Amino acid sequence: MQAVLPIETRKIFSISELTSDLKNLIEGAFPEVWLCGEVSNLKRAASGHLYFTLKDAGAQITAVFFKGYNRSLKFDLKDGLEVVVHGKISLYESRGQHQILIDYLEPKGVGSLQLAFEQLKAKLQAEGLFEVVHKKPLPFLPLKVGLITSPKGAVIHDMMNILHRRFPNVDILVHPVRVQGEGAAEEIAQAIGEMGRRMDVDVIIVGRGGGSLEDLWSFNEEVVVRAIFNCPITIVSAVGHETDFTLADLVADVRAPTPSAAAELVMPEKQDLLHTVQDLRQGLQFALKTFLEAKRAEVASLKRHIRHPRAILEGLAQTIDDLQTRLCRAQKQILEMGRLKIEGMARHFEALSPLKPLERGYAYVQKEGFTILSVNEAATGDILSLRLSDGTLKVKVL
Amino acid sequence: MTKPPKNLKFEQALEKLQALVGKLEDGELSLDDSLKVFEEGIDLAKLCEKKLEEAEGKVEMLLKAEENSGEPHDI
């Protein structure tokens, strides 16, 4: 039996007809489907549409992710990424190719926000935005504090209460912003830019209360991170709770675990500062008092050792008198001694006087003017002089 | 020693004041210098107290529509 059918009984399709039937078949079978696979051959057209291939070990399928849908993607799509997608299958007739038109895409395993966070963090970290060397210190005493936060809710009131409690007359400038939702990141970035240009603000706190990763997402956006980095005024991030860490926290000069903690961090207590100044004042006064007392004691001590000039003179006068007296006495003594000596010598001399024996009856005999001592010196008939105590006798020797 | 400059920051004035108290407590200065240091210290203490009262306790809320007064607009 011949397999070939007569020409009249064959149904001959055109390519277009077949393709059209296939299209209906395929699109009818998969009006929506969830797929999982690996991204490869990723191309981004100038139009913003994304074209790639989704594959697994055994097969692959062309994927189209139009701009209208992919615009909301928070993270960067890359080759090699495992993704879960939702879309509908279609047949692209002119190429005869089936494909999936994706309306939703998420990374497999980790949330898309989480992935976006990690991608941006890595990128900015590589640029050095989080380095400690860029961080500015808190001012010692901020007299004007800038707040960038939601004007609604408890957070702003908590911060203002704490600031005022610690320093009652501090000036506060609030730039209200939306802290979540579409466009919030741009608002926050702009507020930071504007406040950073003011010369009167000493420190800025930017933050919000707690929430989910989605709620806090604005503080992970690149535009906010760059605004914080470029801010010339010291800026404190205060986002969510203690355990929440956003990229804003990493780039800020100081990270506070909560908005209330931020207010406590930036504001010193006025009373503490006043007491410090007053203590120092007292320190000055006490130190001066002690110093002067010490000096006075020194002067008094020196005074005791100094004698009055008159007293000195009087003392000297007395000494002079004393010396004079002693001099006189000494002189007298010397004279007296001399006199006695002379008297003694005189008496002695007198005793030795040859005239003294004459008073006792002796006479000395002279012959022709010379004294004779022996009888042999006179002959009979000589004329001799006899000197007696009261005169002379002339005598003849018989 | 002259009066402290008005634009001296609180922190710097406080540090200087602490240094002066230390100097005076050492007691190594002459009488003249001691009196000068005392005077300068008192002036700094007054400046510090004045600075603490400088802020007026104003709370200003910037309205979205307004630019900050006096800020030049970017063209």
Image (tube, helix red, strand yellow):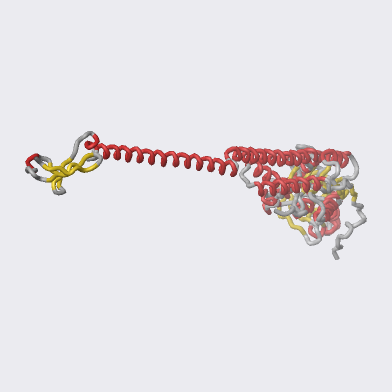
Of A227 and A93, the residue lying toward us = A227
- Between A215 and A107, the one lying in front of the other is A215
Please state if A358 lies on the left or on the right of A180 as rendered.
Answer: left
Residue at image coords 74%, 41%: A281
The residue nearer to you, when weighing A90 against A277, is A277
Q: Which residue shows up at 71% across the image and 41% down it?
A: A284
Q: Quadrant of the C terminus of chain A?
A: top left
Residue A203 percent coordinates (x, y): 79, 49
**Rendered view: A282 above or below A72:** above
Q: Position of residue A358 (x, y in %)?
A: 22, 37
Work out whether residue A242 can be spotted.
yes
Residue at image position (59%, 44%) is A309
* Residue found at x 81% / y 47%: B50
Establish if A300 lies above or below A190: above
Relative to A363, A336 lies left or right: right
Question: Is A91 displayed left or right of B30 in the figure?
Answer: right
Horizontal and vertical percent position of residue A393: 19, 42
Asked whether residue A83 appears in the rendered view, the answer is no
Q: Report the front residue among A4 and A29.
A: A29
Q: Residue furthest top?
A: A360
